[in-house]
Image (cartoon, grey):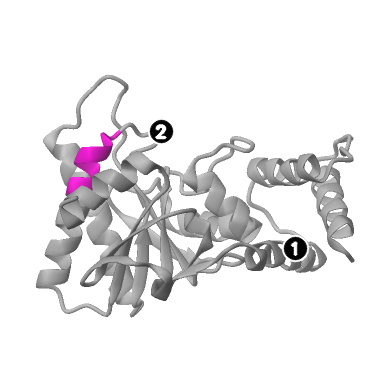
Amino acid sequence: MDTQEQLDFLINYLADERNEAIEIPEDYQEKRNLLRALMNIRMPSKVSDEFLKVQDEFLTAETLNRNLTSVEDIMDADGKIMLWQGDIVTLKVDAIVNAANSKLLGCFIPLHNCIDNMIHSAAGIQLREECSKIMQHQGCDETVGKAKITDAYNLPSRYVVHTVGPAIPQGMKPSGEDCEKLESCYRSCLEIADEYNLESIAFCGISTGVFNFPKDLAAEIAVKTVRQYLDTTETSLKHVIFNVFSDDNYSIYKKILFGG
């Protein structure tokens, strides 16, 4: 199959699975958005080997056509700690961190721009299925401040570490307990990285999106916690990357890390 045929096959499979008649657009980007939306709303369940083969070929080709970034490509660094601005799903590192919700199944809102949605969409439907198995085994929602690790599937990283940060009600300030829980998120991810003997991990801005944690305070907590961990722990980690997407977040981290 060529790319168009793969896309049509995947859309038709997911539409048939839902027993819905879906009008498939002609425009490629609209068609691609439809596939992502269908993946976003799909509950975890078994899928055919043929679907996985076609999906993996399609998503892997997309990943390889992106401008991927390795640790060696990142210039802003202070010892083991690095700062990089860009799309976390293009980082070729041992693990990237996903800011998950307590269900740990990814974002079900079609085409939502949260990092949880972006990661699951680029990884493939196997990621939600693996998360579902973890949660079924656990038997309860994920605790705020804890983390779980999964394969990364069609992402350029090897693993995804999922952590649930504290949610701050709109208009409220984080409490001391909220700050402690955010610290716990970073420590839990670092501990998992060491458990798996990883050398590189990239953090997103945990809780700073729809969970409303103030970005400047979150960055201070993130840097402090990582520095303390690296200074006091015998670790396999050689590179800890703070990944930011916006210019303002980059400025916040640059000032904390490098004083400018």
Question: Residue 11 at x, y = what percent?
Answer: 82, 48
x%, y% of residue 186?
26, 56
Which residue type does callout 1 highlight? Phe
At mark 1, the secondary structure is helix
- On screen, 15 above or below 132? above
- The residue that label 1 is drawn on is 58
- Residue 46 in the magenta stretch? The answer is no
In the figure, 133 relative to 114: above or below? below
Q: Provide the residue designation for mark 2.
A: 210
> What residue span does the magenta drawing correspond to?
213-220
Give x and y (percent) for residue 227: 15, 63
Q: Residues within 10 Å of mark 2 (few under 14, many from 20)?
A: few
**Residue drawn 49% across the image and 40% down it:** 114
Q: 214 or 141: which is nearer to us?
A: 214
Residue 214 lies in the magenta stretch: yes
Q: CA distance from mark 1 to mark 2?
A: 30 Å
